[in-house]
């Protein structure tokens, strides 16, 4: 079985967020902590060194190995905020069209600043994704 590099840790979420160098990203991360807590009704934990995650789900990789990963989460990166939509961004095209400025890959939604997007739509995306 192959080992996953990103696993749940005991690291402090607050310590991590307070250490985010980019002031705006740090402020947005604190807002996302509140938003995710309202939506998921679970406590945030660190997944690896830089992902704030909520809940967990189990999955099987193509090689047959079983793994666990955050059901929902985000990462305040230097260039943008990464919001993870584990069911895939393509499942949310209608809402994404109303979100505001963003980019996305298969499961990562990249946002510059929360103030530039519709956070009601963002909350709906997160809630739909974990449903």
Image (cartoon, rainbow, N blue to C red):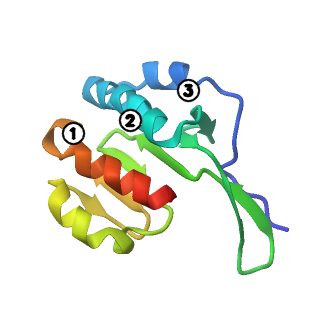
Q: Which mark is residue 113?
A: 1
Q: Is residue 75 left or right of residue 53?
A: left
Label 1 neighbour load within 10 Å: few <14, some 14-19, many 20+: some
Q: Quadrant of residue 62?
A: bottom right
* The disc label shown at residue 86, or none: none
User: In which quadrant will I find the N terminus?
Assistant: bottom right
Reading the image, the residue beneath label 2 is 35
Say if 24 sits above or below 116 in the image. Answer: above
Q: Find numbered disc 3 in the image and state the secondary structure of the residue it sits on.
A: helix
Residue at figure coordinates x 38%, y 49% from the top left: 82
Q: Front-most of 8 and 5?
A: 8
Residue 31, by quadrant, is top left
Mark 1 vs mark 2: which is more N-terminal? 2
Q: CA distance from mark 1 to mark 2?
A: 15 Å
For mark 3, what is the residue?
13
Q: Residue at x 80, y 71 (%)?
A: 65
Where's residue 27, x and y in %? 30, 24
């Amino acid at each position: 079985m192959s080992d996953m590099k990103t696993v749940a840790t005991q690291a402090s979420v607050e310590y991590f967020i307070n250490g985010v160098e980019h002031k705006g990203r740090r402020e947005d991360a604190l807002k996302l902590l509140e938003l995710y807590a309202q939506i998921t009704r679970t406590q945030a934990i660190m997944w690896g060194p830089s992902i704030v995650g909520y809940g967990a789900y189990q999955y099987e990789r193509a090689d047959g190995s079983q793994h666990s990963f955050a059901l929902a989460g985000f990462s305040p990166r230097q260039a943008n905020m990464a919001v993870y939509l584990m069911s895939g961004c393509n499942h949310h095209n209608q809402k994404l069209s109303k979100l505001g400025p963003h980019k996305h890959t298969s499961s990562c939604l990249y946002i510059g600043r929360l103030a530039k997007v519709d956070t009601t739509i963002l909350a709906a995306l997160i809630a739909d994704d974990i449903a």
